[in-house]
Amino acid sequence: REELELQYSDSMSVLAERKLAAGDLDAALGLNIRIWSINHKREDLAERIMRLYVQRNQPCDALKIFNETAQFLQTTIGTEPDRPLQQAAAEARRLCEQQGG
């Protein structure tokens, strides 16, 4: 089952990258969220989703992804998010506050 999930997420990642390269932020975001929903441990996906939300001018939604990921990592693995994810969260937090969120 894990191998199938890995193959699925790899295929979806390729498709998401193609959508992003074509300028379709909505499709890229949707695909990345699908992948992340089956594997919350993927901090790289959480960061990618957060950056897509920021590009769409939705930084407060980016923070929701960070919070869910941070909580998952803490409760299941007992660790904090990695530095790139924390940096993406800091940027999203700043932008969210500017929007009054």
Image: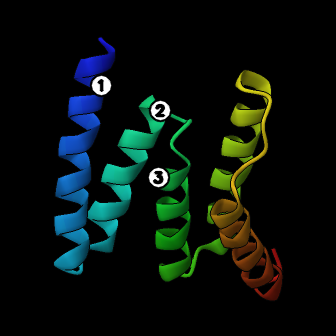
| Numbered label attached to residue 5 | 1
Labels 1 and 3: the sequence-earlier one:
1
Q: CA distance from mark 1 to mark 3?
A: 14 Å
Q: Are marks 2 and 3 in contact (CB under 8 Å)?
A: yes
Labels 2 and 1: the sequence-earlier one:
1
Task: Provide residue 71's location: percent of width, then percent of height.
Answer: 76, 37
Label 2 packing within 10 angstroms: few (<14), some (14-19), many (20+): some
Residue found at the very far bottom of the displayed protein: 98
Q: CA distance from mark 2 to mark 1?
A: 9 Å
Secondary structure under tag 1 reads helix
Secondary structure under tag 2 reads loop
Labels 2 and 3: the sequence-earlier one:
2
28 lies left or right of 99: left
Q: Amino acid at mark 1?
A: Glu
| Numbered label attached to residue 45 | 3
Front residue of 67/101: it is: 67
What is the quadrant of residue 70 in the picture?
top right
Q: Which residue is mark 2?
A: 39
Query: Which quadrant of the rendered structure holds the C terminus?
Result: bottom right
What is the quadrant of residue 30 in the picture?
bottom left
Q: Amino acid at mark 3?
A: Leu
**Vertical order, 60 against 37 (above or below):** below
**Vertical order, 24 against 80 (above or below):** below
